[in-house]
Image (cartoon, helix red, strand yellow):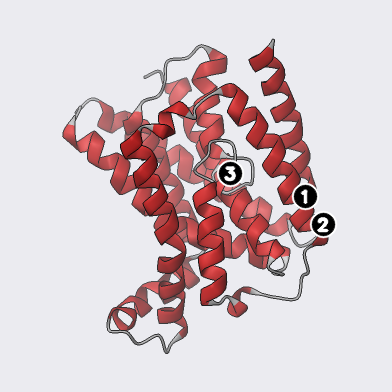
Amino acid sequence: MPLLQLILVAALQGLTEFLPVSSSAHLILLPKLSGMADQGLAIDVAVHVGTLVAVTIYFWREVSMGLAGIPRMLTGRIDTPGARLAFLLLIATVPVILVGLILKVTGAMEAMRSVALIGWTMIIFGIVLWICDRYGAQGRTTPDWTLRDAVILGLWQAVALIPGTSRSGATISGARALGYDRESSARISMLMSIPTIVASGVLLGADVIQNPDPGILRDGAIAAGFACIAALIALSLMMRLLRSVSFTPYVMYRMILGAILLIIAYS
């Protein structure tokens, strides 16, 4: 694959994975609208690995705490902050794994990769994000996360398997609707992304391993590296901006892109 396309795919994935604008939609649209060849499953897995490394680095304090709590969680002891975090992340990940498997087995995922559908979901879930952010309370923070909230946000995350919805956009909307402040909503959403990306990588990686291509390893390493850098930049900027700016700029972007896609789809 040409180096320029690798960098473009990696940057697109890295910049949009954690912003509420749908990275999967942008990766689907890139070959459809640019005329470039589809980057392929192996590169998709590689850029997801890159973003996983980025979010792990950025939230290393919480990640290390959750990892340290896994042994206690596995023995049924949810009595430390780390064990509690690991347990809640596990619960929040179950719905997206189950729904994802169903969509993959039935082939429904491929059927949803249309420009028109992405255009509609961009607009509809952009409006949902705006409503939740505009009218949601801001009295709760990350330590207030409960089992009930983990289940609810897990369902929001499963809905985001529809292309154009945005995993981060859906979970941030859900967290804002539950009364979490903007920064905590984003933090919970980003932490939820870690086991979800791991599960997605395992699912997609299984297909790649079955059809190995030694020549793709170099391209994958390059794509993963650039995706990691782009994701770190996006994460840093978003978390800083949320201290003074709402999610409205992302809503506006979604509305404009959604309108353009609908014009293209129905023209």
* Image marks 2 and 1: residues in contact by CB distance under 8 Å: yes
* Crowding at mark 1 (Cα within 10 Å: few <14, some 14-19, many 20+): many
Q: Residue placed at 71% from the left, 36% from the top?
A: 123
Residue 127 image position (x, y, % from top left): 75, 44
Up the image or down, 32 lies above or below 90; here it is above
Q: Is residue 92 above or below residue 100?
A: below
* Mark linked to residue 134: 2
User: According to the image, label 1 marks what residue?
Assistant: 130
Secondary structure beneath dot 3 equals: loop
- Residue, x 42% and y 15% (percent of image)? 37
Q: Quadrant of the N terminus?
A: top left
Q: What separation in Å lies between label 1 and label 3 (alpha carbons)?
A: 14 Å
Above/below status of 263 relative to 106: above
* Residue 165 percent location from the top left of the image: 59, 41
Of the residues shown, which amino acid type is indicated by label 1? Trp
Residue 84 visible in this rendered orientation of the protein: yes
Marker disc for residue 166: 3
| Helix, strand or loop for disc 1 | helix
In primary-sequence order, the first of circles 3 and 2 is 2
Who comes first in sequence, dot 1 or dot 3? 1
